[in-house]
Image (cartoon, grey):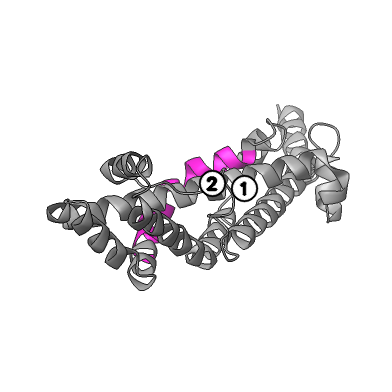
Amino acid sequence: MQNHSRRLLLAGLIASAAAPAFAQQPFFGQFTQQEATRALREALTLASGSATQQLGRPSGFWSDLNVRIPLPGILGQTQSTLARFGMSAPLDNLQQSLNSAATTTMPRAATMFVDAVRTITIGDAINIVRGGSDSATQFLRGRTETGLTRLLKPVMRDALTQSGAFTLMRTALREVGLASMTTQLRTEVTDFSTLKALDGCFQYIAREERAIRGNPARRTTDTLRRVFG
């Protein structure tokens, strides 16, 4: 009985000593869990930084038709109707001002993305790093969109105010006979602009992620080369 107990104790000690080494062993036969986590954080930091930098340039949203923010709801419908008669200039100016406001929120969005990337865990990385071409972006969006929307909305509201977009909207609504809807549409424009600004960010982040996965030249660190190579 004593020999049996000694064997169990010895086996337990060997297993305990081996556990840390085992945890560091490569999974997928190529890299460790820690490397996967580091690579994922690096990739998303690079991708989100590039996205917010490009969209934060002058006319960042406006100059790219893929992410240009339209006017929402009745504003967009009225703009389309008036455009047929060459009378949509007030709403066209509003749309451009709205896109300019979105551009000015990008530095704040960049900080939010960095904070979100830091929360990625080893468990997250294992499920993502070998996923599809934009799996990291999809994970980031699922993890952060609600919080980012809540945090970015006041920034967007301030940007719309400071850019003169709301003043333009009030003038445009008066000219097209919709002045009574000004207060309601301020909220709608803020919510819609925030959503579309984030849509644009995630579209750019996905593009950058695909580039990192598919183009060796975009893997700028040893960890990225090892994990995504």
How far across and how far down the image is residue 163, in percent? Answer: 39, 70
Q: Quadrant of the N terminus?
A: top right
Q: Quadrant of the C terminus?
A: top right
Q: Magenta span has 137?
A: yes
- Amino acid of disc 2: Val
SS of the residue under disc 1? helix
Whether residue 23 is visible to the viewer of this picture, yes or no, is no
Residue at 42%, 62% in the rendered image: 97
Q: In the drawing, does residue 159 fall left or right of residue 175?
A: right
Q: In the drawing, does residue 150 fall left or right of residue 59?
A: left
Disc 2 target residue: 67
Disc 1 target residue: 204
- How far separated are the C-alphas under marks 1 and 2? 9 Å
SS of the residue under disc 2? loop
Q: Nearer the viewer, mark 1 or mark 2?
A: 2
- Amino acid of disc 1: Tyr
Label 2 crowding class (10 Å Cα cut-off): few <14, some 14-19, many 20+? many
